[in-house]
Image (spheres, rainbow, N blue to C red):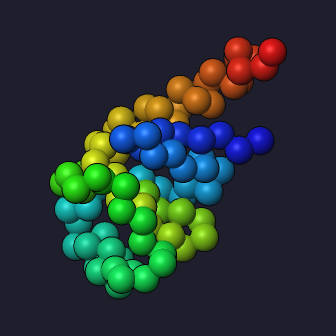
Amino acid sequence: MARLINIGFGNVVNSDKIVAVVSPDAAPVKRMVQSVKGSNSLVDATQGRKTKAVIVMSDDHLILSALQPETIARRFGEAYDFEDRGEGHE
């Protein structure tokens, strides 16, 4: 079952398709973002704020977020922990 993870400002992503959540500061990540800039493979979910995380998706999309990678990772973990304990089922 697909779980949606909030990546800030009401934007959500399908957690089943997340490959990695990385900092945008590393040179390889900057090159990845530059290579898809201007295409439909880049989704800017920062709402005009500074990019603090790049989410790499399994379908070759990159998503820019204004949240720290640690925050997204924590939300990802909480969503799966919540489901695993059976609290997400009615």
Residue at horizontal 22%, vertical 56%? 48
Q: Is residue 22 visible?
A: no
In this picture, residue 1 sits left or right of residue 40: right
Residue at horizontal 36%, vertical 41%? 9
Q: Eyeballing the image, is 33 above or below 2?
A: below
Query: Where does residue 74 sit, x and y in percent of width and height?
Result: 43, 32
Q: Nearer the viewer, residue 41 or 25?
A: 41
In this picture, residue 18 sits left or right of residue 63: right
Q: Quadrant of residue 84?
A: top right
Q: Eyeballing the image, is 89 above or below 62?
A: above
> Which part of the image, by quadrant, shows the N terminus?
top right
> Which part of the image, by quadrant, shows the C terminus?
top right
- The count of marks equals 0
Q: Quadrant of residue 4?
A: top right
Query: Where does residue 82 sit, x and y in percent of width and height?
Result: 63, 21
Query: Where does residue 28 sit, x and y in percent of width and height?
Result: 29, 74
Q: Eyeballing the image, is 3 above or below 51?
A: above
Residue at horizontal 54%, vertical 63%? 57
Q: Nearer the viewer, residue 74 or 61?
A: 61
In this picture, residue 63 sits left or right of residue 65: right
In this picture, residue 28 sits left or right of residue 79: left
Residue pushed farthest right?
A: 90
Q: Is residue 31 visible?
A: yes
Query: Where does residue 23 sit, x and y in percent of width and height?
Result: 28, 55
Q: Nearer the viewer, residue 20 or 54?
A: 54
Residue at horizontal 36%, vertical 62%? 44
